[in-house]
Amino acid sequence: MTAADIAAQVLDLVRAGAGSSARAEVMVATTHQALTRFANSFIHQNVADTDTAVRLRVHVNGRTAAGATTLADAGGLRGLVERTLAAAALCPPDPGWPGLAEPAPLAGPAQVDESVLAATPADLAERVRSFVDAAKGLETAGYCRTVHKSATFANSAGQAVTGATTEAALDGIARTGGADGMARLAATGLAALDGAVLGARAAAKARAGMDPVELPPGRYEVVLEATAVADVLRNLAFWGFNGKTYVQRRSFAVLDAAQFDPAVTLVDDPVGTEAFGLPFDAEGTPKRRLVLVDAGVTRIVPHDRRTAAEAGTASTGHALPDGETWGPVPVNLRLLPSPPAGATPGPATGATTGSAATLGAGPAEVDGPAADSDVAALLANVERGLLVTDLWYTRVLDPKTLVMTGLTRNGVWLVEDGAVTRPVRNFRFTQSYPQALGLGAVRGTGRFPVPMPGSWGGERFVPPALHLASWNFTGGASG
């Protein structure tokens, strides 16, 4: 059976089991993933997996329940419907049921690259080999992966949509003398992944990070590379620009308030050229481009149908599979570059996006930590501060103000009078992310947003590098 046939059969089974008054929605999603991993500069694992999941949600007699199965034959589908209807009968009444998505066309197709569908293990291994060779003898580790997702959605209100999306990603480190250098990149297709460029970048940063000094904790001016800014966007998305935290008043977001520096424009663009994901959400609502923050002013918070009903607005197409607990999240968040000095700001639109070439083009220091011209341009305006490659193990201390704690990783350097002077040991930080991007806090943005691989396979954050006035480092990595 096709995905459309499976969805239609599930809806027929719901009607047969619960009557025509039952409301149901079903998503049939197939994911093919291929992964080539390497360590000690050798490929040690090559795996591929294809799975099909059928997700069902029903609303019967005022009660709501959901279920899922990977058994898409007649018996598996019958069992899914029977279990889900039985669960609904045991659930408490659901007075907040928002109803089903009505029929509506998609805003645009998702991004699909045929090279991902045709990729072989040799294609991934070729990029790994280029990464390893470019490191010129340094120990390397990481992965190269491809993902192809396709899905069909249908509900008993008549909405029926289908779509597909692809991703290719390379993430690797190079190590020497206890110092690590890193490079990572995501794209719609394989052509954008240049293992040689990424490997050379990682190796240059590793060599430049040897024999770091320890600096005292405190507030430092910083340049965050795109790899670090991706963590900022991820946590802004999951904790702040989340319809559930917003309606529960656990979010920092205040609509129509100037909460950020005018240099900050945040766009969730699920149908853009660098997006990763289906063109509709788990409730069948078409996705569209949203400007969340426009020149520092918070304009909108994404919603699914339930949180939209609570907020008195409409769904923005951000329901996630099994996302009732977590809430709706903008998973294609982009930080747009600020216009050059003297340019006339226009409406928030797209921006030139980074690639492997962007990460290595125009190097200011062939063997230094500033491995691209974007970062070098921001460093030129730093009087005394730090260049930070990556943030990791970040955790929320205060969701309302989004105070985060975490560690730096894969390279930190002292910057004095616009020049990198010495490597620095890793720091622990405690910092409110919205405060770090607040009014007067953003001193510059890079010109080229760089797509970053998602950490859990469903998101794509696209940030440029950032020059910030202050970042609160509270101790060394050990405490």
Image (cartoon, rainbow, N blue to C red):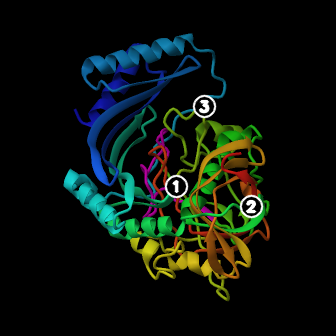
Q: Are marks 3 and 1 in contact (CB under 8 Å)?
A: no
Q: Secondary structure at mark 1?
A: loop
Looking at the image, which is closer to me, 313 or 223? 223
Query: Which mark's residue is nearer the viewer, 2 or 1?
Result: 2
Above or below residue 437? Residue 94 is: above
Residue range in magenta is 266-285
x and y percent of residue 461 in the render? 53, 57
Identify residue for label 1: 332
Identify residue for label 2: 436
| Magenta stretch: includes residue 282 | yes
Please name the amino acid that badge 1 sits on.
Asn
The mark total stands at 3
Above or below residue 479? Residue 471 is: below
| Residue 12, quarter of picture | top left
x and y percent of residue 61 in the render? 56, 16
Give the quarter of the figure containing the N terminus.
top left
Classify 10 Å Cα crowding around label 1: few (below 14), some (14-19), many (20 and above).
many
* Between discs 2 and 3, the one toward the N terminus: 3
Please name the amino acid that badge 3 sits on.
Thr
Looking at the image, which is closer to me, 328 or 93? 328
**Distance between the Cα atoms at labels 3 and 1?**
20 Å
Looking at the image, which is closer to me, 145 or 353? 145
Q: Secondary structure at mark 3?
A: loop
Q: Secondary structure at mark 2?
A: helix
Residue in the image at 69% along x and 81% along y: 381
What label sits on residue 325 in the rendered view?
A: 3
